[in-house]
Amino acid sequence: MKLLRMIFKIDILPRTAQRLFCQRRCTLTRALVIVILTVLVVFGILNYRNGHVIRNVDRVTRHPPPTPYTTCNSLHNRPLSNKGPHNHNVQGDLKIGRKVLIVVETPFSRNAKNIAIGMESARFVYKIVEGNKIPTLTHMGKGRFGIVIFETINLYMTLDDWSRQLIDKYCYEFKVGMIFFMKPQNDNGVSMEKFPDFSLTVHYNVGIKEYKLNPDSRVWRITKPGEIVSETFPEGEWAVFHFNHSTFEPLASAIQIASFYDDYEPSAANSNKTVYPAILDKGENDGIRRVFFGQDFSFWLHSLMLLDSISYLSYGMISLSLERYIQIDIDDIFVAAIGTRMKADDVVALVESQSRLQESVEGFHFMLGFSGWYYQHGNEEENLGDRTLLEYKDHFHWFPHMWRHEQPHKFSQDELLNNMNLNYQFAKENGISVMDQYAVAPHHSGVFPVHDPVYTAWKTVWDIKVTSTEEYPRLHPAWGRKGFVHRGIMVLPRQTCGLFTHTYLLDSYPGGPGRLEKSIHGGELFKTFLYNPLNIYMTHLSNYGNDRLALYTFESVIKFVQCWTNLKLKQGTPMDHAIKYFDMFPEEQMPQWRNPCDSEKHMEIWSANKTCDRFPKFLVVGPQKTGTTALYTFLSMHPWIRSNFPSKESFEEVQFFNGNNYFNGIDWYLEYFPHPQDKHEYLFEKSAAYFDNILVPKRVHNLLPNSKIICILISPAKRAYSWYQHMRAHNDPVAVNYTFNEVVSASDSAPREVKALRNRCLLPGEYAHHLERWLDHFSYRQIHIIDGEQLKDNPIGVMDEVQKFLGIEKYLNYTSIVRYDSKKGFYCQVLSDNKNKCLGRSKGRQYNPMDEESEDFLKKYYHKHNTALVQLLGKLKIREPAWLKDYTNTAR
């Protein structure tokens, strides 16, 4: 009882509990309750983790950790290792593009999908077409494609004569190579097919073993010959090639295994002879170079061989760098359930592994992300492991997590500042040097979807300039992850390696140990090294204790990369990586905001006080000077339609998607919209400059893919003149000092300010061109086009059509609430006192008619654009506006 009273004195239990239990007389029941509560409280305090209790995990009796893969023939074969990567670049001007043409039977076949994923992973620009649908191959005397890949050789052979001659002529004249894959035949046993056009014979359904590459071929650049694939491929999986012409060169050889039929026909036995499952046609026959693969793209080694074949056949035009930057983060330092944390010997093993990896990876150091609150929260052995980590702290690079591993999106900026300052003090007190200006948020919380307070707190406390996440733009597919920049912090794409917080024993690896082996030996993990110029890998503390799976995984895959490739692995600081990454992919600096509400994973790391209901359901996108403000006013009269809040800078327009406001992020955008009072309400935004902005359609679709789009079209000549008069009324120097005709007919040698006004007058009126861009991202069913003249003359009818398009259940009859105002010259809202409420002074402005010379110029200028618009609207079965009638016959 004395012990319990001491516990209560230090306030482990609240004072009410002290008064309840700690009195002079205690019954046996009361004493038992006290003991149980005390145990529970102490247990909870010792194991509290981020608002929930992590159970102790009984540590399984440790077997010796698995030994990393180290066998590598090429490292012991000096003639092979000295050959080095070949340079495919040639002197002279190549008249081909850096684009890959892929011809497939169907884009939905497994092989077609795998080839496309390979191109996506390598970030090659490509186009997929089916069979005979060959696209335009040249543009202005230059080839559009640098390589042509056929899903199967049979697809090439069955092209119609015109398509095949077109492809052959193009490849011959522009020195463009071809690549063919083979697929097994359906017949039983080994079959043979001759291809006289290539002087080639193919044996199908062959079984092979001991697959190896020709070390003398100049095709190899990334690929390092010298290794032998240990796998045996049974009969039915491969095709091999037979040739007797000097134009052919083996790229790979193998041993053919005994056929099932050899037991019955010994004379036909083909076992244990060398065959060629991949060959190069050097073009000596017909001037076209080709590579033939004896299986589809599912064979892991074909990933390397295809990259090198593309580089070789395109003369280095379509190629990847040999440099690969890697960074291995160890998240959750000091954070793990008791029984799964690192011990002192695990820390020593980490240091030793780092030393071995430094022999293969220039500048390598493990990056350790710490949450200081959990220091010394394990059992006795694990607490010694914590202390050993600090003893070896100078061997590693460190970065901050959160103090108690909280998810940042759940906290305000002040709370985050306090939290990070505690971690900062912990680092200072324990001599942990954090100098890389890099941080990672637990569970990627707050990085994307963006929670602005974490960005601000990072900058304030740690001066963070770089972070990483696997969530942008989404978790899957892994090869689609990108980087972006927000609030001055560079966000890099992060990769997984198959190991997570719950993966710390080899025998319990999801899918079995064989799945991990496959990922390392040519599978998913290996391919991240192959395709990505920068890989930041996410791992966790528990992966380095227990079976030390992370050490096994990375030492094995890096050795495998070293055996099979000429890639040069290196590590810099996170800032080095960020600068390098955005130098390679500068277009990614601009973020592409996606809707968190479309992803369950993103909703889990989006702040609870944010709601999907505030996203607008439709947008009025312009163009300017066509009546968008009038439409905005009519829409706002509807009781179920609510607009965005006005902006101080741009009045009723938010102008989020078309300028610098976009970089303020989703939270900034949502603040312009009210919380809906009813689930039936429709929120909308009107920003008229969206229509002709090249970036806007894609940005809108990324964030609001299900939104509806409303455009208003008037005569483009009338729109151009209205814009000029608008600028003149605002005392624009060019509009005041130049006539309308001088502006619209200005040449490209005119002063920059004149050309700028000319473009703002003319370009938005090229309606078909801009609508096509919107239709690249939205279905025509999502786009509603209003005739601007009808909106002016018959707004009641137009608003009926708009309500039908939006699908609003509550119909509003505008007859009773709008009235024509003869003074203004357009319809205005009727107020309760029977007075009209019209648009502002700038609307309905009167000015002199357009001069005839300008009318003639604009009629000629817009003729082809208006004709294209008639054709487009006809294709979409949309009734063209009355002002387009003159162009209908021309278009037809």
Image: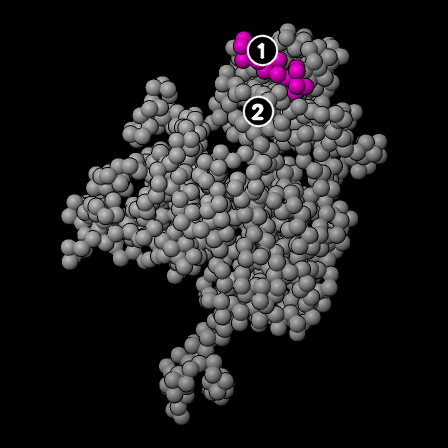
Residue 592 position within the rendered picture, expressed as x and y whole percent measured from the top left: 50, 46
- Residue 306 visible, this orientation: no
Using the image, determine if residue 810 lies above or below residue 251. Answer: below
Q: Residues within 10 Å of mark 2 (few under 14, many from 20)?
A: many
For label 1, the residue is: 165
For label 2, the residue is: 101
Residue closer to the observer: 654 or 824: 824
Residue 772 found in image quarter = top left
Residue 408 position within the rendered picture, expressed as x and y whole percent measured from the top left: 50, 62
- Residue 315 visible, this orientation: yes
Which secondary structure dominates the residues rendered in magenta?
helix
Residue 438 position within the rendered picture, expressed as x and y whole percent measured from the top left: 62, 59
What are the residue bounds of the magenta stretch?
A: 161-176
Q: Residue at x 36, y 57 (%)?
A: 646
Answer yes or no: do the residues labelled 1 and 2 have beta carbons within 8 Å? no
Residue 661 position within the rendered picture, expressed as x and y whole percent measured from the top left: 47, 53
Q: Residue at x 66, y 72 (%)?
A: 428
Return the disc, 1 or 2, that comes first in the chain's sequence.
Answer: 2
Residue closer to the observer: 169 or 751: 751
Using the image, determine if residue 807 lies above or below residue 436. Answer: above
Task: Please indicate whether residue 354 sits to the left or right of residue 163 in the image.
Answer: right
Q: Secondary structure at mark 2?
A: strand
Magenta stretch: includes residue 170: yes
Task: Please indicate whether residue 157 sits to the left or right of residue 615 in the image.
Answer: right
What kind of residue is marked 1?
Gln
What kind of residue is marked 2?
Leu
Residue 846 found in image quarter = top left
Check residue 658 in the rendering and tell me which mark sits there, or answer none. Answer: none
